[in-house]
Image: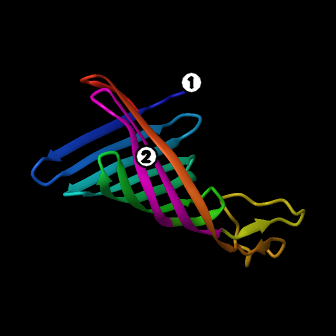
Amino acid sequence: MKKIIGLSLLCAAMLYAEETGFVTHTELGYVQTSGNTDTKSGTLDFTGKKSWEKSSLQLDVDYLYGEENGIENSNKLESELNYDYKVADHFALNYLVGYKDDKFSGFNYQFYTGPGVKYKAIENDAHKLSFQFNALYSRDSQMDKFYDALGEEIKYPYVDPSKDLAVSTVPGITDEYGSFLLKGDYSWKITDSFKFL
């Protein structure tokens, strides 16, 4: 007989203070099941924005963690900090700083930063569409890779190469390069209580 216990928690909080121009939105999630497979997972989604005069600063953070039968199977953090300086009604100068850390992607971390521009193509009561373009400096730090005696890559959970002489290690490298980012954001306010993002 399979027994499943589920626990789900969704916490959403929104704070708006017109006099300070500070807005935050936070969502927390947690799920746990037990039975043939025991799993745990948790998520955090945070957005904070501060506006003053022609400037605005926005921080976005997404985090995901998961385990299956006591073994970690996801551990991912993504964060971006955007600074905008409005030069016209639909046009702003931008500076972006981003950081990604995903234990199961093969990278210790990925970092990028650079100037750019934002353009609001549509902005009315129902629809909003904007585009962002940045020229970036990027830095990627790759994780060490481990191989067994047959040359097969050993995935997480890793072994200790000092305790198993049959395991070989290929050190990770760090790449630095220029890149470009182009993204669009669209939202549609269908009703007062329903929004498509």
Residue name at image x 68 percent, y 64 percent: 158
Residue name at image x 52 percent, y 65 percent: 112
Secondary structure beneath dot 2 equals: strand
Secondary structure beneath dot 1 equals: loop
Q: Pick whichever, 129 or 68, lies toward us.
A: 129
Asked where in the image residue 107 lies, by quadrant, the reply is: bottom right
- Label at residue 20: none
Q: Position of residue 88 (x, y in %)?
A: 31, 51
Q: Position of residue 46 (x, y in %)?
A: 34, 50
Q: Which residue is mark 1?
A: 1
Instruction: Report the magenta stretch's main SS.
Output: strand
Q: Does residue 177 lie above or below 35 as drawn?
A: below
Which of pointers 1 and 2 lies earlier in the amino acid sequence? 1
In the rendered structure, which amino acid carries the disc numbered 2?
Gly
Q: Position of residue 114 (x, y in %)?
A: 48, 66
Could one spot residue 102 in this view of the protein? Answer: yes
Could one spot residue 110 in this view of the protein? Answer: no
Magenta segment range? 113-142
